[in-house]
Structures are given as structure tokens and as C-alpha cells.
Amino acid sequence: MNILLALLIGAAFGATLDRIGATSPNWIIRMLSLRNLHLMKTILLAIGTGSILMFGGQMLGLVDVGHMSVKTAYVGVFLGGLMLGAGWAASGYCPGTGVCAAASGRKDALFFIAGGLLGAAAYMVTYPAWKASGLLDKIAGGKVTLGTVPGAEYEGLVGMSGDVLGIVLGAVFVLVAFLLPERLVGEGAAPVAAE
Amino acid sequence: MPLNWKTGGVLLGFVFFLAVLLVKPIGVSTQFVILDAIIGNTVNAELITQTDDGAYTSTNAYLAKSNGKYAKNAANPLNYSFVFVLAMMAGAFLSAMARGGVRAEERRLPAIWRANFGDTPMKRYLVAFLGGFIVLYGARLAGGCTSGHMMSGMMQTALSGYIFAAGAFAAAIPVAMIMYGREA
């Protein structure tokens, strides 16, 4: 059953990443260089939509709160984010879009995957040093959500009801997606070269 | 031309919602570790071991952490998260074919690279390789990537998702602006 769901949801995710342009380094770099925010709007709307559906579903009792999986906050999250960001901009790929791009026939994505496998292996080897450095120790409570989600095993940062806050923030993401201009850098129509 | 952002955004958000509704939030970067472990264990069968009580562990501290969770998944690759990534590739392949495929020129070298660095595929492949290295090293240090931390995390209002997104964009925007000065 689980494998069937992995096949269905995985395929839907891969196909969607391809259809929104996220498997193309051109669209990723247009977004990150702030010259065409089309993909940024897509992503913000997706986070907002997902958030509203999930927390709304939880409030109505249709979504199992136990399916949430919140990751730990620690200083390494920020450092790792910086590293990922730099490589994401240089290559135009992140882990998910990289494997999908390779599947769609992009040659450079194969090199991205090879580098990724080596990078992950390098982390496996150097993990004890990070662990010893204390940079993986949890901060601000570790596995926390911004509000306190009823029925969830996670603590909330603020006393506010987590599901209401989730819907409010979801709406903010949707709003920002609509308000964001087509481009922030450069002039004229945003670049959309044929591919 | 990709889907209109309103259609694409709702569609993508629905997929992330569906994953939480039916199973668990989407994540990808861990599977690079799992594939590494599978390869590593083929070369050196001592890497992943099973104790008498059936639990998995590894000589590598990272694979052994959290009660050997990664070691177990690498020893049993037909698990949800690994199959999920293989299915993503199949989905992206079918989608790309359905829209007529990625053009040969683009498959060889993305337009944005050509506009900035000319016809230099070897240089591009090297940058993609090095980029992949720091993306996955960073993702494992952070404990997740764009899917797990940024999308799934911020969607669940996870503090860690916001910290990750702040770091990722703080580096990505200047690097993209400096490296790719020309539009395409």
C-alpha cells in the first residue's frame, strides 16, 4: 500500500516539478537572480495552499495530525541552508529538481547527481566532527512549530493556536504570491526565452 | 513555457498536501545518503550490519544514528521514501515527454549558461558537479533540502523551515546575481 502511494505521489510530484519549470536551471536562476519571479510566485502559492489545506483539514478532523513531521532547529540548519543556497544558484538544481531534470534528459543534471552523491558521502564521513562541534544541538526547543498545534507532539514557539496561525500564514503566503511583481531586478518584460 | 503560476502553485500545493494527508511530508535529500549507503554496502559488506535482535546499525556513525534508521532503509531499498524519489524521476520523464521533450540544445547546455559563459559544456558540467556536492553536503548538514525543509517545513509552520529558507536565499540570491549577469 505504502509503495503504491510512493509511486503515485512521487510521480505526481515529479510531473508537477517539471510542469512548473522547476526542473529547468533557466527558471531557477531567473528566480534567484530576481529577474523573473514566476517560479517564486508558484512556490509561495504552493506553500500557502498546502498549509491552508493541511491545517484546515486538521481542524475539520479530516487530516491526521500525527502525519506532521517537524524537523529540529539548530545552527547547522542555517549553515547548511547557506551552502545549499550557493550550490543551488550555481547549478540551478536542488536535490529534487536535479533528479527530475536528469530524468527529463538534461546532461548537466547527471553531473549534479554525481556531485551530490559525493557531497552526501562527504557529510557521512565528517558527521562526527559536526556532532562534536555542538552546531547540531537543538535551539529554541528543537522540533517546534510557530504556534501550538492541537494534538501534535511539537511545542509551539508562541501560545497562539497552531492551526489558526497555520491558516493565517498560509493566507499570507498566497497574498505575497499575488503581490510579488513579475521582476525585482532589471527593466522591461521578464525574460522567458523559449526552451 | 511552464504552467501559469496560479495553476502550478495550486497543483504543487495540492501534491504537498496529499503527501501529508496520506503518508508524511515530502523530502528528497536523505535518499542521496541511502543510495550512497547501498553502493557502499555493495563494495564493503561490513558497512551495514544487522544485530541478533533484527536491528540495523553501521560502522558509519551517520548511518547508525537514530537507531540505525538510515542503515535499515539502505538495507531495504524498497521503502516508501526511496521508491518515492524513483517515482519522481518517472513522473518528470513522462511529463517532459508529454510536452514534446527537452530540446537537444537545452539538454546539452541550459540557455542561461550559454548566455553567460558561451558554448562551454565541460565548464558547465564541472559547475553542476561542484554545485551538487555543496547542495547535498549542505542539505545533510541542515537535515533537509528545498522539499523537506523549505516547502514541507514552512507549510507546517516549522521554525527549522524558516531558518533553512533564510539561509538558502541569503546565499542563493547574491550567487545567482553575480554568476549570471546576463539574462536568458
Image: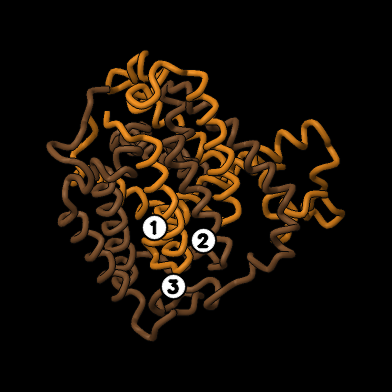
Chain colours: A brown, B orange
Disc 1 marks a residue whose amino acid type is: Leu
Residue B20, compared with residue A10, is above or below; it is below
Of the 4 image quadrants, the one containing the C terminus of chain A is: top left
Neighbours of disc 2 within 10 Å: few (<14), some (14-19), many (20+) = many
Same chain? Circles 3 and 2: yes
Residue at 23% x, 65% y is A172
Q: Position of residue B38 (x, y in %)?
A: 70, 37
Q: Secondary structure at mark 2?
A: helix
Q: Chain of mark 2?
A: A
Residue assigned mark 2: A78
First reached walking from the N terminus: tag 3 or tag 2? 2
Residue at 71% x, 33% y is B39
Q: In the image shown, does B118 or B96 lie closer to the viewer? A: B118
* Residue depth check, mark 3 versus mark 2: number of the one nearer the observer: 2
A48 sits to left or right of A70: left
Q: In the image shown, does B49 or B159 lie closer to the viewer? A: B159
Residue assigned mark 1: B21
Q: Secondary structure at mark 1?
A: helix
Numbered mark located on residue A145 in the image: 3
Disc 3 marks a residue whose amino acid type is: Thr
Q: Position of residue A33 (x, y in %)?
A: 32, 43
